[in-house]
Amino acid sequence: MSTSAGWDQPRTSLYTDHYELTMLQAALHSGAAQRKSVFEVFARRLPEGRRYGIVGGTGRLLEGIANYRFGPSELEFLRRNGVVNEETLEYLAGYSFSGDIWGYPEGEAYFPNSPILIVESTFAEACILETYLLSVLNHDSAIASAASRMITAAGHRPCIEMGSRRTQEESATAAARAAVIAGFDSTSNLEAGLRYGLKTVGTAAHSFTLLHDTEREAFEAQIASFGPGTTLLVDTYDVEAAVRTAVELAGDQLGAVRLDSGDLVAQAQWVRQLLDELGNEHTKIVVTSDLDEYAIAALQSAPVDSYGVGTSLVTGSGAPTASMVYKLVSRTGDAGEFVPVAKTAKNKTSKGGRKYALRRLNEHGTATQEIVGIGRRPEDDGNDRPLLQQFIKNGELLPGWTGPEGVQRARRRHAETMKELPAVVNRLQRGEPAIPTIYEED
């Protein structure tokens, strides 16, 4: 299986839990490992009060599956620590996913019990992917969902992802990617820019101003290096004095000023007035400082041009995981026929059977229901939209889902799905899912 990813990704096989491999060993022993199986990723519920979720991470996941291999170092680690026996090690040495994977396109909205990803292969091939699948989808979908809410609150004003210093380094790169998929304009993360072709931005922190003997000297250095169109951070000392100095040095070509503290609504208003009085009607105002979707919504009436968002974004704005699960929903029996299977324990029930999904639209093109067929495709009433797309066929990654191309494709999908959803998704107040999930069974 090959990938179109534009960077050297390490093997991903040990990004997993110990018990995935012990299950494999026991299944090889029982003879059930080669049973054809269908696994499904879904979320039983949305985070408390959220009205929709956004699928994130699919492209990263597909890149990782292409590199899900057990090389000499991984096999030696497993042997040395007695994780599995030699029969299992022999199987793992030749492991390469050869099945089919379907799913909601990255950037698509999802709801409770949406069949976000469907893996069709042998039990052995699909079982050991569980932890890796869920770690990627849970993290990236949480970030994409939070980012989508922030973009909705921001309206037409651009948002900048700048949360790298608030999370682990690989999570930071993944978060930047997920944020751009959900509509963020750019990121401060250079690794994300390299891997996924994202627009990167950044100028200076307070330490740059503090490094110099005066604020004027700091501004002079930045303008001399980057030109008058740069963005100057004006709240290290006195904001009014800093704005006046910035305009004096850069003139009416000053690109932007950044506000990072204080009452941002009131401060943006009088800074805008001051800039206009000084003849800098075209100088923009960028605000940062622990923003989330609620703070962004509160700034709607302020003369702000863009938002920089960090901590709240990379932590999912209060919902750091999408709570997705990976369940076996169908497998072949002794006669080779597919048998629906499902967990029935209290509070954690699921529905067995291979799923098919479409989004029901009304005459205005607005989504009204998520229709999930069990064992068969739901009937399209004429203008409904099928949701599941194939990503991998017979172990081969289909083109267009990964790398920079995949990011832009997902970004377009997010924009389209948001236009399709009912207006209730624009509300930040707590509420029920925007549309219900309806099952159609044989």
Image: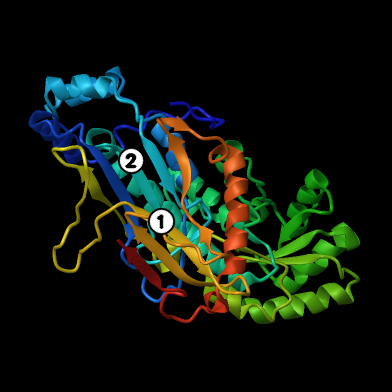
Instruction: Pick the residue in front: 394 or 166.
Output: 394
Which image quarter is the C terminus in?
Answer: bottom left
- Classify 10 Å Cα crowding around label 2: few (below 14), some (14-19), many (20 and above): many
Q: Earlier in the sequence, mark 1 or mark 2?
A: 2
Q: Amino acid at mark 2?
A: Glu
As drawn, 237 above or below 142: below
Q: Residue at x 13, y 63 (%)?
A: 345
Q: Nearer the viewer, mark 1 or mark 2?
A: 1
**Is 420 situated left or right of 378 in this image?**
right
Which image quarter is the N terminus in?
Answer: top left
Instruction: Calculate the distance from the C-alpha at mark 1 to the C-alpha at mark 2.
Output: 16 Å
Q: Evaluate whether residue 142 shows in this view.
A: no
Q: Position of residue 383 (x, y in %)?
A: 58, 65
Q: Residue at x 9, y 29 (%)?
A: 29
Q: Name the residue carrying label 1.
A: 377
Q: Amino acid at mark 1?
A: Arg
**Is 317 situated left or right of 18 in this image?**
right
Mark drawn on residue 120: 2
Q: Residue at x 12, y 30 (%)?
A: 31
As drawn, 375 above or below 91: below
- The residue at the far left in this view is 30
Q: Position of residue 116 (x, y in %)?
A: 40, 54
Label 1 close to label 2 by CB (< 8 Å): no
Q: Residue at x 60, y 37 (%)?
A: 194
